[in-house]
Amino acid sequence: MSALKDKYAWTATVGEKGQIVIPKQAREIFDIKPGDTLMLFGDRERGIAIPPKSALTSLLNMAFDDGEDGDK
């Protein structure tokens, strides 16, 4: 199986309190620091997604667009 550019997969074990540790490589790639708040999106069929901060910024910008292009 060939590696896909900028595509990654990791595993995490759920502890007794329901906590997981985000692997170091994932924290480094996505610039996740202690104290950061992450959003988790879930779909019963598709699973859980934890998008990178940049994706959240883009999503929020689209959702709260102030209509500068004339659309209000």
Image: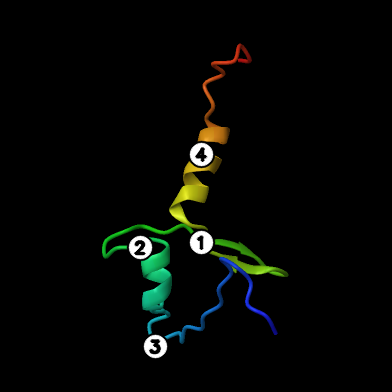
Bin the neighbour count of mark 3 within 10 Å (Cα to Cα): few under 14, some 14-19, many 20 and up.
few
Amino acid found under the numbered disc labelled 4: Leu
Q: Amino acid at mark 1?
A: Leu
- For the residues labelled 4 and 2, the Cα–Cα distance comes to 19 Å
Q: Looking at the image, is mark 4 or mark 1 nearer the viewer?
A: 4
User: In terms of depth relative to the viewer, which is nearer, 19 or 65?
Assistant: 65
Name the residue located 51 percent from the left edge and 61 percent from the top edge: 40
Residue 32 on image: x %, y %: 35, 63
Q: Give the residue at mark 3.
A: 16
Q: Which residue is mark 1?
A: 40
Q: Which residue is mark 2?
A: 32
Position of residue 20 relative to residue 6, above or below, is below
Give the residue number, with chain letter if any, for mark 4. Answer: 60
Residue 67 to residue 44: above or below: above
Tell which circle, 3 or 1, labels the residue nearer the N-terminal end.
Answer: 3
Q: Quadrant of the N terminus?
A: bottom right
Residue at 60 percent across and 63 percent down: it is 42
Q: Earlier in the sequence, mark 4 or mark 3?
A: 3
Residue 34 percent across, percent down from the top left? 26, 65
SS state under label 2: loop
Q: Mark 3 or mark 1: which is in front?
A: 1
